[in-house]
Image (spheres, grey):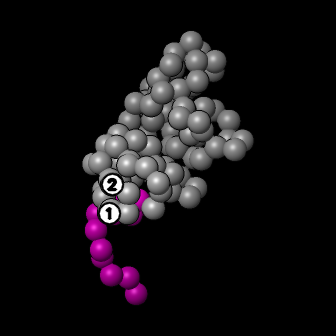
Amino acid sequence: MARYVQRGETIDFINNTSAVIEAGDVVTLGTRIGVAATTIDVGAKGAVNVIGVYEFTALGTEALTIGQAVYFKDGKIQATSTDAVAAGWVVEAKVQAGTTAKVKIG
């Protein structure tokens, strides 16, 4: 049996880190990411978006194609999964020299 809790576009997240999470910051959620919907103080609960399309900083050394799975590492979107967290998939092609990528998370 399952009991409906919420739509699931945004989840509650307790900031157990040592730094304030600012609105728009990428939050690692185990094997995936979310994006802070609000500022979340240390020890506080706040909203993290887990569905949507976001523009991220991306490596400027690789092209990305629509539908391609991408990963988040060191503050940037990249094509390789090594030591990275799954971010989602590309919704708009990115040329190799491009420094941002539009990614569907969730």
Quadrant where the image shows the N terminus: bottom left
* Viewer-side label of 2, 1: 2
Measure how far apart labels 2 and 1 are at the Cα level: 8 Å
Q: Can residue 59 be spotted in the picture?
A: yes
Other-residue count near label 2 (Cα within 10 Å), few / some / many at <14 / 14–19 / ≥20:
some
Q: Main secondary structure of the magenta part?
A: loop
Mark on residue 14? none
Please, is residue 10 above or below residue 104 in the view? below
Which contiguous range is marked in magenta?
A: 1-15
Mark on residue 41? 2
The residue shown at (32%, 63%) is 45
Q: Can residue 52 be spotted in the picture?
A: no
Please, is residue 59 above or below residue 80 in the view? above
Other-residue count near label 1 (Cα within 10 Å), few / some / many at <14 / 14–19 / ≥20:
some
Left or right of residue 59, residue 3 in this image: left
Left or right of residue 4, residue 15 in this image: right
Marks counted in the figure total: 2
| Element type at mark 1 | strand
The residue shown at (29%, 48%) is 39
The residue shown at (32%, 53%) is 40
- The residue singled out by tag 1 in the image is 45
